[in-house]
Amino acid sequence: MVKKLHITDEQIQELLLEVDNHLKLPGPLMPILHEAQRIFGSIPVAVQKIVSKATGVPIAEINGVVTFYSSFTLEPKGEHIVGVCLGTPCYVRGAQTILDAVKTELGVDVGQTTKDGYYTLDAIRCIGTCGMAPVMSMDEDVFGEINVTKAKKLIKDYR
């Protein structure tokens, strides 16, 4: 079952407190959105409306920022984030084949979360480990010299 966002009064109050703190500083929108993502795990339209009302920033502008920057997400992510690097060194060493195998293994496309809410699949760009290409990440852990077999094993091991 895909994780649904449940907004609590406590979360709203925490966000409003962060809005008040950041409105006193120049350029408050980005830090506010980062706090919103930390609090809610994503920034869907319902959360964007709260930010808009509290800041006076039009929702269209907020949505433009949220959808432009890859660090923000409109939907909750899975418990574990699986990333396959598609930077040039990884790509030329077979990362697309690995990504295709991981998509099949998880039954999702890039940017999607498994039905059980356990994994979200991301295609990532260079993470600075080009000497170990191709690389794959599981949350904050990076694994180098990955192939299809190793990638499938990593996914199973994280269960």
Image (cartoon, rainbow, N blue to C red):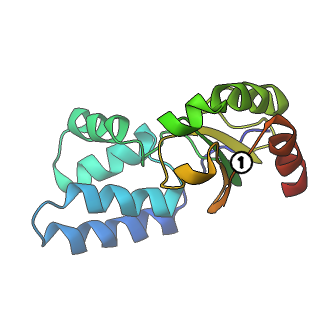
| Residue situated furthest left in the rendering | 26
Of 111 and 56, the residue lying toward us: 111
Nearer to us in this view, 35 or 140:
140
147 or 123, nearer to the observer = 147
Give me the residue at 76% from left, 33% from top: 102
The location of residue 121, given as percent across then percent down, is: 66, 38
Q: Looking at the image, which residue is at 41% across and 42% down?
A: 70
The residue at the point 26 percent across, 41 percent down is 62
- Horizontally, residue 50 falls left or right of residue 112, namely left
Residue at 47% x, 63% y is: 38
Residue 156 drawn at (x, y percent): 90, 48
Give the residue at the far front of this rendering.
Answer: 131
Residue 82 seen anywhere in this rendered image of the structure: yes
CA neighbours of label 1 inside 10 A, class few (<14), some (14 to 19), many (20+)? some
Residue 27 quadrant: bottom left
Q: Quadrant of the N terminus?
A: top right
Whether residue 87 is visible: no
In the image, 133: left or right of 118? left
* Relative to 2, 40 lies left or right: left
Q: Quadrant of residue 105?
A: top right
Residue toward you, 146 or 138: 146
The three-letter amino acid code for the residue at tag 1 is Glu
Horizontal arrangement in the rendering, residue 8 relative to residue 65 (left or right): right
Q: How many marks?
A: 1
Q: Which residue is mark 1?
A: 145
Give the x, y percent position of residue 18: 32, 70
The spot of residue 106 in percent (x, y) is: 80, 33
